[in-house]
Image (spheres, rainbow, N blue to C red):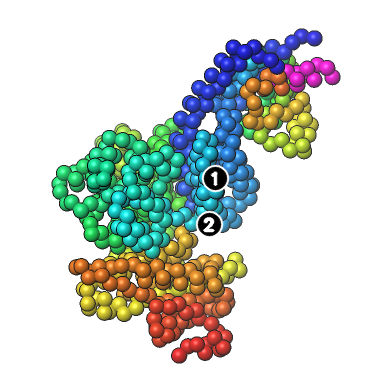
């Protein structure tokens, strides 16, 4: 149909306007999708969430195509179809890796937007596309001292980070138009350009708009600089010469916070509208929330949704809050599930009674949205901390001896059921005693936490890591065996040896040895039995001269290389 | 033969609604009514008395095919030509949609400059046959 010319122009103009509006809204939608996909726990209980993701992907694929974002539309379409396929079956069957890769691909959708305007290096973009489940952390380092930058880059890469170096602030700003790092580390003073990074960031929003954690390093320790850094909301201030393990420790903390899964909250309230409101408020704050109106279903709901906190109305028509709390507490595995009541201020007597029956806390109605979010977040975080204190080692944040042994047995049993191999690695820092004796226990602690950080950075999310004893670590690697496991550990061994530690000006380095044992070689072995042979292999590595990896083998020929 | 004037479009995505409105009103010169769900469509369609209906296939709640089925149960909508709009256009699926009583299937994303002529062609095909 031939539209007359002015109309065609007017249409084009209006279309352009619609497209602009749409483009402006895209980042928020992509961020929402990313958050949604990042919250998957990887099981049937994610169905509602996956369903929502599927719908939104569908809409995005359609609208993206309409507005000419062809690459975005095509990629979104693939993800839409994948999620649809999953929804057709049991979500419990979907493997953890697949969930992670879905989340990573959703998170990477934004990259397709770069493909719209400048025709730049598609090869690089597609290389990044192939990075799926095991996300490497991208660090941008803005530092005008090339040799310091190179040194720092090498160190950070030893810890498994990917580092991109920019000599000038302007270079990083240019890159920020199309890409986004996971963290930004900046020097403060750039004498050649006469620039101070804290001033540049305050004036020009582009790097701040990246929204990623920001760390500064500087050789000046003056209050004014520190105050400016604080005003920018930076996550850290590190003095030169840099203590890299300490820097990495801070980086690990920050990333752990970012990776923390959303808080799961169950709301039990007979007031459907109010419960729906609370739920929306919590969802908007990035949490997962479900509302339950029928108290009879409480046990099924708690079992399926696995809430980290239950928000319970004190007064409900047929069953009171404390009665329902009592029902939950009858089940031993939920004995420590935090239960918080919502009640009016005047219910003092009932509050006291409820306290005696398994309530943890009260929130007073009416409660503002902001109060509700803050109260729930604080209580869930507290519960998580308590749980971490029970199961995790305080220095490294890794699982403690008993917990890692338990996790190992569970993993070995599961793997056997699925016919997949598991490898157990036992690692030990070489000559650790002499590190302690020479440089003191504080330095020794830094070395130990460096091994922990390295393992967390280099291993997959599905791997389990524990501190087994003083300087001894255990890593459990599901679906990994033989050459892969050996290569992985070799890589960790090399990276660890490359880390430069320093103690009051003295530089030193350490090495580690490891013994591996896999169910591929020992199909009948329990976790505890695997640990015994892994320990023997570790002993062989030590006897063989340390700084090496040995794999246990039941075949006598290969036993010959044992001394 | 009368000309196509009134087009009724059911689509849940506001962005696509906006583009479709542009394409059908400005380019096509049609009188357009857009509904955001099958449920809303069933409430509005009789009063609008469309010459032709466009249905998005995948919508939350009532999807395109179930909206079509419900529309056909309204006496005044029994023979109004309906076309589906969908991203999935494998021949087998087109055949399936036609078997449900649709005249045709318009693939998404559509070109806003040519959507009106596609719609007109479907309408003419309907009246020619």
Dot 2: chain letter: A
Q: Residue furthest front?
A: A192
Q: Quadrant of the N terminus of chain A?
A: top right
The residue lying toward the viewer, choosing from B73 and A286, is A286
Which residue position is annotated with label 1? A122
Lateral position of residue A294 relative to residue A171, left or right: right
Question: For the residue carrying disc 1, how many other residues have a C-alpha within 10 Å: few (<14), some (14-19), or many (20+)?
Answer: few
Range shown magenta = B119-129
Q: Residue at x 55, y 79 (%)?
A: A522
In this view, the mark in front (2 or 1): 1
- The vertical placement of B81 against A140, above or below, is above
User: Can residue A126 be seen?
Assistant: yes
Residue A49, position in %: x, y? 51, 43
Q: Residue at x 59, y 12 (%)?
A: A6
Which residue position is annotated with label 2? A96
Q: Residue at x 33, y 73 (%)?
A: A510
The residue lying toward the viewer, choosing from A384 and A543, is A543
Q: CA distance from mark 2 to mark 1?
A: 29 Å
Residue A476, position in %: x, y? 46, 69
Lateral position of residue A239 relative to residue A150, left or right: left
Q: Quadrant of the C terminus of chain A?
A: bottom left
- The vertical placement of B69 against B76, above or below, is below
Q: Which mark is residue A9?
A: none
Dot 1: chain letter: A
């Amino acid at each position: 149909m031939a539209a007359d010319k002015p109309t065609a122009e007017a249409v084009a103009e209006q279309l352009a306007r619609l497209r602009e509006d749409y483009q402006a809204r895209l980042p928020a939608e992509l961020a929402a999708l990313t958050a949604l996909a990042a919250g998957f726990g990887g099981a049937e209980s994610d169905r509602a969430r996956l369903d929502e993701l599927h719908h939104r992907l569908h809409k995005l694929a359609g609208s993206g195509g309409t507005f000419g974002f062809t690459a975005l539309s095509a990629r979104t379409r693939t993800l839409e179809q994948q999620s649809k396929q999953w929804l057709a079956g049991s979500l419990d069957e979907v493997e953890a890796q697949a969930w992670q890769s879905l989340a990573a691909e959703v998170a990477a959708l934004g990259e397709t937007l770069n493909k719209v305007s400048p025709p730049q290096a598609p090869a690089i973009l597609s290389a990044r596309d192939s990075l799926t489940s095991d996300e490497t952390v991208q660090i941008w380092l803005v530092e005008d001292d090339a040799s310091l930058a190179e040194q720092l880059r090498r160190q950070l890469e030893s810890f498994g980070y990917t580092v991109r170096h920019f000599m000038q602030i302007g270079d990083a700003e240019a890159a920020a138009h199309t890409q986004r790092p996971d963290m930004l580390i900046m020097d403060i003073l750039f004498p050649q350009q006469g620039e101070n990074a804290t001033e540049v960031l305050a004036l020009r929003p582009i790097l701040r708009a990246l929204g990623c954690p920001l760390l500064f390093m500087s050789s000046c320790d003056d209050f004014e600089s520190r105050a400016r850094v604080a005003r920018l909301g930076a996550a850290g201030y590190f003095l030169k010469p840099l203590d890299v393990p300490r820097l990495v420790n801070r980086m690990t903390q920050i990333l752990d916070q970012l990776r923390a899964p959303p808080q799961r909250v169950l709301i039990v309230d007979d007031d459907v509208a109010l419960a729906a409101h609370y739920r929306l408020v919590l969802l908007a704050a990035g949490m997962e929330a479900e509302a339950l109106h029928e108290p009879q279903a409480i046990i099924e709901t708690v079992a399926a949704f696995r809430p980290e906190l239950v928000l319970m109305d004190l007064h409900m028509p047929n069953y009171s809050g404390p009665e329902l709390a009592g029902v939950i507490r009858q089940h031993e595995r939920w004995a420590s599930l935090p239960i918080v009541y919502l009640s009016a201020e005047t219910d003092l007597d009932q509050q006291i009674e409820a306290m005696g029956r398994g309530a943890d806390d009260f929130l007073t109605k009416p409660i503002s949205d902001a109060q509700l979010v803050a109260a729930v977040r604080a209580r869930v975080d507290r519960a998580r901390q308590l749980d971490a204190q029970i199961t995790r080692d305080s220095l490294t944040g890794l699982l403690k001896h008993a917990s890692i042994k338990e996790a190992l047995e569970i993993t070995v049993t599961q793997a056997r059921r699925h016919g997949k191999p598991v490898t157990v690695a036992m690692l030990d820092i070489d000559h650790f005693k002499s590190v302690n004796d020479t440089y003191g226990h504080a330095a020794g602690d830094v070395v130990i936490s460096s091994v922990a950080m390295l393992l967390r950075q280099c291993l997959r999310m599905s791997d389990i890591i524990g501190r087994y004893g003083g300087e001894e670590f255990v890593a459990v690697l599901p679906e990994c065996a033989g050459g892969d496991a050996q290569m992985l550990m070799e890589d960790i061994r090399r990276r660890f040896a490359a880390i430069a530690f320093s103690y009051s000006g003295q530089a030193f380095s350490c090495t580690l040895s490891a013994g591996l044992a896999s169910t591929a070689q020992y199909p009948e072995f329990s976790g505890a039995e695997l640990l015994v042979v892994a320990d023997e292999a570790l002993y062989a590595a030590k006897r063989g001269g340390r700084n090496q990896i040995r794999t246990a083998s039941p075949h006598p020929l290969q036993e010959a290389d044992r001394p | 033969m009368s000309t196509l004037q009134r087009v009724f479009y059911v689509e849940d995505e506001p962005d696509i609604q906006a583009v479709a409105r542009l394409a059908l009103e400005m380019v096509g010169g049609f009188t357009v009514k857009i509904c955001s769900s099958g449920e809303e469509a069933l409430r509005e369609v009789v009063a609008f008395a469309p010459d032709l209906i466009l249905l998005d296939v995948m919508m939350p709640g009532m999807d395109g095919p179930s909206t079509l089925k419900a529309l056909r149960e309204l006496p005044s909508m029994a023979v109004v030509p309906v076309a589906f709009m969908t991203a999935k256009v494998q021949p087998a699926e087109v055949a399936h949609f036609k078997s449900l009583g649709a005249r045709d299937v318009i693939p998404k994303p559509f070109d806003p400059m040519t959507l009106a002529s596609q719609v007109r062609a479907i309408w003419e095909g309907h009246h020619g046959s």
